[in-house]
Image: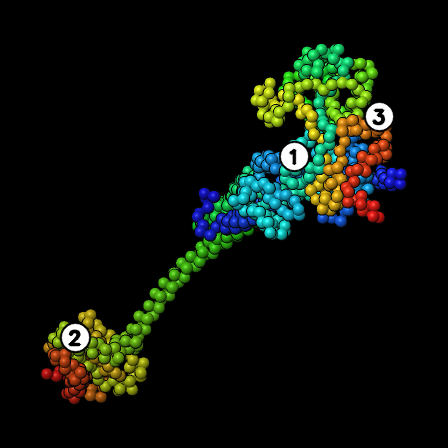
Amino acid sequence: MKKTIIILISLTIFSVFPFKFDASANSDKSSSEIVIVINNWSSQMVLSRIVGSLFNEMGYDVSYAKMEISQQWGALARGIAHVQVEVWEGTMDKMFNKMVEQGRIIDAGAYTATTREEWWYPDYVEEYCPGLPDWKALKKCYKIFAVPETYPKGRYLAGPWEKPEESRIRGLDLNFATIIVKESNELWIELDKAYKEKKPIVLFNWTPNWIDIYYKGKFIEFPEYDPKCDTDPSWGINPYYMYDCGNPKSGWLKKAAWSGINKKWPGSLQALKNVSLDSRMFAQMTALMVVDKMPPEQAAQKWIKDNYKLWESWVPVNFKKRKTDE
Amino acid sequence: MNNLPEVKNSITLKMLKLIFSIYVLVASSTTIIQMGVEYYSAKKNLKAELEGYTKMFSLDLAAALWDFDREAIQRISSGIMEVPVINGVAVLDLENNGKKVIYSAGCLSENSTLKEKPNKPEKELISFSLENDAYEFPIEYFLLNNPIKVGTIILHSDTGIIFKRLKPGFTTLIINSIIKSLALFIIFLTVGKILLTKPLSIIVASLNKLDFQDLDKYRPINIKSDYDNEFKLIEKAFNSMIERLFKSKSRLISLQNELIKSNELLEIKIAERTKELSQKNKLLDELSKTDPLTSVANRRFFNEILEQEYRRLGRVSTHLSLIICDIDYFKTYNDLYGHQAGDKCLKAVADQLKAKVKRKNDCVARYGGEEFAIVLPDTNLESAVKLAEKIRKEVEYLGIKHEKPDNLSQVVTISMGVACSTIALDEKECCFSELIERADKSLYRAKELGRNRVEFAD
């Protein structure tokens, strides 16, 4: 209980004093805070706080830096930020693998949860568009997804992340237009609205996601992913264009850290590696924020409280001993 | 201009040369300065332009540097190399506070000036780059609105590119200067012709036509100008001078005519005076040769004639005779009849002698007192004696009353001595005296023998 109070206090402090980014901050500077990257989707926001609490538990100061995915790699490589708790294969594999190969960042291990990012629809849409989840069904019933902005083309609701969706539509010759939302929450608002009215909708979704708990649906099954699909136009069903395939299935979800993290903050890398969640846990954790409308700090606090033993097990042994000695 | 004769050191031409040279010098200087300013301005603008290109590419380049994406860096840098003014690009990464060339192309490629110097401090590399017409710009990545320097891009654009850009401008500038210079030259030439050469031609032509003999036909200089200028002043002064000259000439002609008249009068007077003088000289000469009482040659002229004739003797003539005659008892005559009667007697005797001696070269002279001498060239003794006798008789026949002491004759008579010489010229001096002496002795002998007679020397 005492620990929980400490964690809560620390989380409150972080929320009251927003992150102040120092442009000159890097491993050589006197900054002693472990900087955790904050992205713009719910699970990442909550999980970052949970991991931050873990470092606090180890005795390290932590700060949070909100940045785009595109910004995080340079920050992690330069030691401006030190930890990214969610690296999705579907969207970040190339940069992650390159950075790891160059030794600029450290692969801090994968979660047990596997990931998939793809076009998704609620189950009831199958009634309007027989043949789903096969992508070819979209070629016939695209009009049911049309909205005034896209008519006669069907609407595909995409997230605020850079994805080659337009290329995929062209490669697979789909009669769809992409509408990109500004924030991921807009996706769920649209989904909820359509879901309640049983209106056809196809949108970007991923797993693990809290959506899994509340909305039943399926990913569109596009042609199987192959690395050549992203690089070789002749590969796939369309010999002229790339991206004539779906996203990888059962992708990994990993953690990344600055290459010098363990030297500066001994044990921190091990702690990060220890962090592991399955898909269900991810969904539950995210739901605290999205469904229960908790701020990420509060959601993290709630999650730690509910999963304290698991959370505590992630603290490296050495630090537990030291704490015991104290 | 055609009317103006060629002048070696024409002032107009000198002024034209001087002004044109100064203008060309000034125009060339200003053109060079302008070109220099244009060059430095272009160089400055080039830097700004390169900075602009850098800004254009910097977002993508910063993102690529941020992500250590070499392929993207290469792609973007290749794109930068396509910009015409850029002929070299190098991208430097600032990883680990170092400076690593991660891309270089063009004249900044590894084979050229810019090379990675791992152990050199950053400043040294920058200064090395800038010396080679390279401009360095920092590349900043904005993380949460905070700039983070992630690298450096060096763009190279050499002087040739600047000159290539400035070439049309420079060409226009030079052509402009040439046209201006030529225009000035033509304008000055034309203006010089109108304002200087033409009036000068008029003046020179007028001066060349100027003839003092025909001043009345001379046309005044007329320089066409609506206002007074230097040439107008010259025109006025010159025309005024011509007017004065004309007046002076008229006066001069008048004076000249007067002078001619005076000369003519003078010449007449001189001629008259000369004639008069000549007459007087002649008279004087005659007087100097003539005895004033008797109007026969005097003793001095007698000597000259005798000497002259004596010189002719032996060369031209063969004989020279001399008669000396003396009026008998002339002292008594004077005593008896007075000197005036004596003079009359002398004059009568002389007249008789002149009357009888008719030849041109013969000479009758008053030898002294009541003595007369007659020089007779080319006359032998016989002829001379005959003439003497003839004269003696004629004097006697004059019948001039004279109561002489001898009572032989009561008229004036004369005694005469004659001598003749045939002596050669080389003996003249002694013989000249000797001739007189002999004639004189003959006269004495005639006196001694009773007077009124003729005696001669053999």
> Around disc 2, counting alpha carbons within 10 Å, would you say few (fewer than 14), some (14 to 19), or many (20 or more)?
some
Task: Tell me the number on the disc at residue B208.
Answer: none
Q: Amino acid at mark 2?
A: Arg
The residue closer to the viewer here, A229 or B281, is A229
| 3D distance between C-alphas at marks 3 and 1 | 33 Å
Quick one: SS at disc 3?
Answer: loop
Residue located 74% across and 48% down the image: A29
Mark 3: give few (<14), some (14-19) or many (20+) Cα within 10 Å: few
- SS at mark 1 in the image: helix
Chain-order first, disc 3 or disc 1 = 1
- Relative to A136, does residue B455 appear above or below in the rendering? below
Residue highlighted by disc 1? A97
How many residues crowd mark 1 within 10 Å: few (<14), some (14–19), many (20+)? some
Q: Is residue A75 visible?
A: no
Q: Chain of mark 3?
A: A
Q: Is residue A131 or residue A240 the one in the foreground?
A: A131
Q: Residue at x 54, y 42 (%)?
A: B109
Q: Residue B190: x percent and y percent?
A: 52, 42
In-image side of A229 versus B325 (left or right): right
Q: Amino acid at mark 3?
A: Val
How far apart are the two marked residues, 2 and 3, measured between alpha carbons? 189 Å
Q: Amino acid at mark 1?
A: Asn
Q: Are marks 3 and 1 in contact (CB under 8 Å)?
A: no
Q: Quadrant of the N terminus of chain A?
A: top right
Mark 1 and mark 2 on one chain: no
Left or right of A171, for residue B178: left
Q: Position of residue A118 (x, y in %)?
A: 71, 23
Specify the subunit that label 2 lies on. Answer: B
Q: Which residue is mark 3?
A: A291
